[in-house]
Amino acid sequence: MAEDPSKRIKEFWAELPRADEDFLGAVRDWKNVQIAVDDDTVWLKGFTEEQAVSAEIQQLPDFILYELREGLLFKKEALVPSKKMRTALLWSPIDKALRLTFPASNQNYFGIDEKIQVRLKPGSEEHPVVALVSILSEIKENIPLQQNFKLEKIEWAVINDKALFLGTPLLSLPGKTYWTKHGHLLPAGFDFEFKNLSSLLQQQYNKGSDKWLLWNEDGTYLPIKKEDLRPLSVSSFRLTEKTKEWI
């Protein structure tokens, strides 16, 4: 009986020019992927079927994905092979081969061999939001109307003319929402361009885990000391209202 090709375990390979290897930071945390270098080409293998069709793969420039069949490399849905499987390659786990290092200065840059600016991009996954930043002048009439049992689950801090509210369920107030990742507060719907930077940024700028790093879409952040957060109540809000001049 002939083998059912739909039940065959697919093995994926890929190649891209060495000049574009910095872009691989987006998939560096895929520990199942292996990497090797041959002249001017970077070779990869070990992708899962889900990874092979992911957004991270599709955004890589000059990236060619193959399916390995009987020692031959076929492009996606191709019936004729493009080339033979390369041999004598020295394979290494991608997270070990691509070591991200911090430069001596400029907190917004990290890189593999060269500096790569930290960027946020729209994410493909949904995450529950846990924080809200609102303009104080737009909400000062709303806080006294909130029910006490909702307030007591929230911590808050004042940031210039804004307020950061942290806790769930979030208050029904106008503002920008955030989700949390490894001690970062990221705008809802966004994630780091290079996902593995999340823990590295914490190691560099929040070793004591005593701060929240509040990020903007442009890749800048504001550290918020956790000790500056205090329980939210109508009285604490009104006291702050008296000590600040709001427009």
Image (cartoon, rainbow, N blue to C red):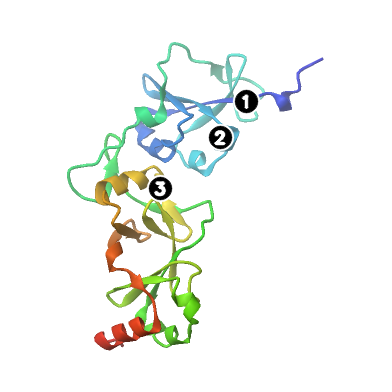
Q: Which circle marks residue 193 in the picture?
A: 3
Q: Residues within 10 Å of mark 2 (few under 14, many from 20)?
A: some
Looking at marks 3 and 1 on the same chain, the residue that comes earlier in the sequence is marked by 1
Looking at marks 3 and 2 on the same chain, the residue that comes earlier in the sequence is marked by 2
Identify the residue shown where x is 43% and y is 11%. 88
Element carrying mark 1 = loop
Extreme residue in the right direction: 1
Q: Position of residue 235 (x, y in %)?
A: 36, 85
Amino acid type for the residue under numbered disc 2: Ala
Element carrying mark 3 = loop
Q: Which residue is mark 1?
A: 10
Amino acid type for the residue under numbered disc 3: Glu
Q: Which circle marks residue 52 in the picture?
A: 2
Looking at marks 1 and 2 on the same chain, the residue that comes earlier in the sequence is marked by 1
Left or right for 4, reference 145: right
Amino acid type for the residue under numbered disc 1: Lys
Q: Residues within 10 Å of mark 1 (few under 14, many from 20)?
A: some
- Dividing the image into 4 quarters, which one contains the C terminus? bottom left
Left or right for 8, reference 197: right
Q: Position of residue 187 (x, y in %)?
A: 42, 61
Residue 181 visible within the image:
yes
> In the displayed structure, would residue 62 be above or below residue 181?
above
Near-viewer residue (224 or 138): 224
Identify the residue shown where x is 39% and y is 44%. 194
Q: CA distance from mark 3 to mark 2?
A: 18 Å
Q: CA distance from mark 3 to mark 1?
A: 28 Å
Q: CA distance from mark 1 to mark 2?
A: 10 Å
Extreme residue in the top direction: 88
